[in-house]
Amino acid sequence: MTAPLLDVRDLSVEFPLRRQRLQALDGISFSLEAGEVLGFVGESGAGKSLTGAAIMGLLEPPGRITAGTIALQGRRIEDDAASVRGGEIGMIFQDPLTSLNPLRTVGDQLVETIQLHLGLSGEAAEARAIELLEEVGIDPERRSAFPHEFSGGMRQRIVIALALAPEPKLIIADEPTTALDVSIQAQVLALLRRLCKERGAAVILITHDMGVIAETTDRVAVLYAGRLVEEGPTADVIAAPRHPYTAGLMASTPNLDAVSVDTVLPQIPGSMPGLTALPSGCRFHPRCGDAMAECARIAPEFADGVACHKYSAVGSMKGKGASNGG
Amino acid sequence: MADRPYLDVTGLSRHFDISDPFLARVVSGGRKRVLTAVDDVSFSIAKGQTYALVGESGSGKSTIARMIVGLERPDSGRILIDGQTAFDEAGGQAQDDHLRQKLQMVFQSPYSSLNPRWRVGDILMEPIKAFGLISERGAQRRRVDELLEQVGLSSPDAARFPHEFSGGQRQRISIARALASNPQFIVCDEPTSALDVSVQAQVLNLLKQLQRDLQLTYLFISHDMAVVRVMAHRIGVLKDGRLVEENEAGKLIESPQQPYTRMLMESTPRFAGGVG
């Protein structure tokens, strides 16, 4: 058994403030094999972007990793992410305009990236840049154009070409299509998935959209208030979500095939707590319809793909005897 | 009454001049360039119903919304609201307070559409005072409390500032402000696209419940086919400023006639086995 491509164990991230420390990520563990597409889903503030930033070593100070390990092919990188950033691990951000240099042509930017990471000569790098542009569906003739001359979807294709240029083992895509129209979103996601599969590169796709998860990922990890609440093969999680939050998230997403104007959407009451006011025990319990007495006191362990007392020994023991407290 | 639509829009058009400045044109020999944002759009909404306009960015859906509430002047066409002329090519824009009071708008971003320096109570009080709906102060305050309760907030919230609320709660405040003038017609411009899904469901359900309770008529603008399916009785599909297809919501979703509508539906991410 070789080490997985990426192995993250008990990752915790904190933001120290004057009076308290905000725990933004609490004991996140997951691993990823080559060629696999793992989706991170959750609402704003759940910690999904922060997980990506922690892996890349891009945490904004004073945020810092306080515990846990990140290993790329068995090599620990949590203290030295700069050595893999942009090379072995590529990143795609939400807004393509901010990740491209507005003053340089896209061809120049590609050639520079290729030369820096692959050490090719000018001519070979140029040829490689042309290949990459063709692969992402952009006419190589346009390599002398500047980023502002492209549409949003085209720019995101260029960003994908840039991320793929150093032949990375892993690409972290943080809401790569949120700024795009749906028709373009579908094309860009399909392109990203195909190119990574062809190269055997793994992808972490960060999104808030369960539909994007369902159509693009192999496995999914659901985050809530800084904790991993459920993880598993996408098809299984979609077909039978186990954590009440995952189930609620899916139920409240309108599904084109199943709704009409008479539908009352199932809703999760309240909203996700801020980091300054995290509830005790399971962080979802104040919004959970299945909450038991234990849930407010004891944080559920993540085991067997889910962190919920409904599936743990505590839950099944106490669940039988205790009357439903409402 | 039964036959007259609540909102009736005919031949609405809006062009934007996107040419270079005059001198630059003289120097470079460039021509005048005109962008047609909305091109001869006609539709109507029955009282108490929701009409949705869907389309991608640049399709002209927000421009139509802004023209109907009077934030933007159409170049041609006619807008009738409850039988009254809101805009007529010949007569121009009506500046009628009585008409203004009947229509309100809920904007996309609850972060930029609420004055950060005003308490929620003052935000809700302004339409009441501006239209002179209630003059006695105690009664004004009771109305504010009632509005807050209608949207699922509580009376102590009146003393707080917008930044103390989450995105979903802020959108509830926007809705309460829209309701403050007792409108009959609300234009909702992507009211949930800045919100998380679990909160989106809350706001969509609230809008539907208010429609039932207060017999409101909605024009609902969105890019999300699934959201539109939940909200609308009728759907119009916009592409490059033109209405390419329009039908009763169920029929449009089940048998879309235009390739563009079909493409929009096919690109909507979906998952099998979801709860409706």
Image: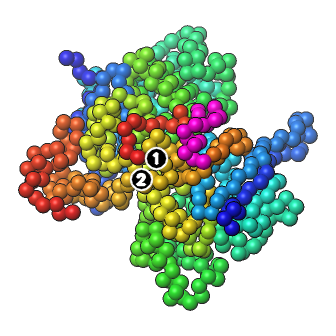
Write the residue at 66% across / 65% down. B2
Residue A265 - label: 2
Q: What amino acid type is highlighted by mark number 2? A: Leu
Crowding at dot 2, Cα within 10 Å, few <14 / some 14-19 / many 20+, comes out as many
The quadrant where residue A239 appears: top left
Write the residue at 18% across / 51% down. A299
In magenta segment, residue B153:
no
Please provide percent x and percent y for residue B273. Answer: 37, 38
Which of the pair A8/B184 is nearer the observer?
B184
Q: Quick check: B200 left or right of B178?
A: left
- Choose mark 1 or mark 2, whichever is in front: 1
Give the Cα separation between the discs numbered 1 and 2. 8 Å
User: Magenta segment range?
Assistant: B248-263
Q: What amino acid type is highlighted by mark number 1? A: Val
Write the residue at 55% across / 41% down. B253
The answer to whether the residues at label 1 and label 2 have Cβ atoms under 8 Å apart is yes
Q: Which residue is mark 1?
A: A259
Q: Is residue B170 visible?
A: no
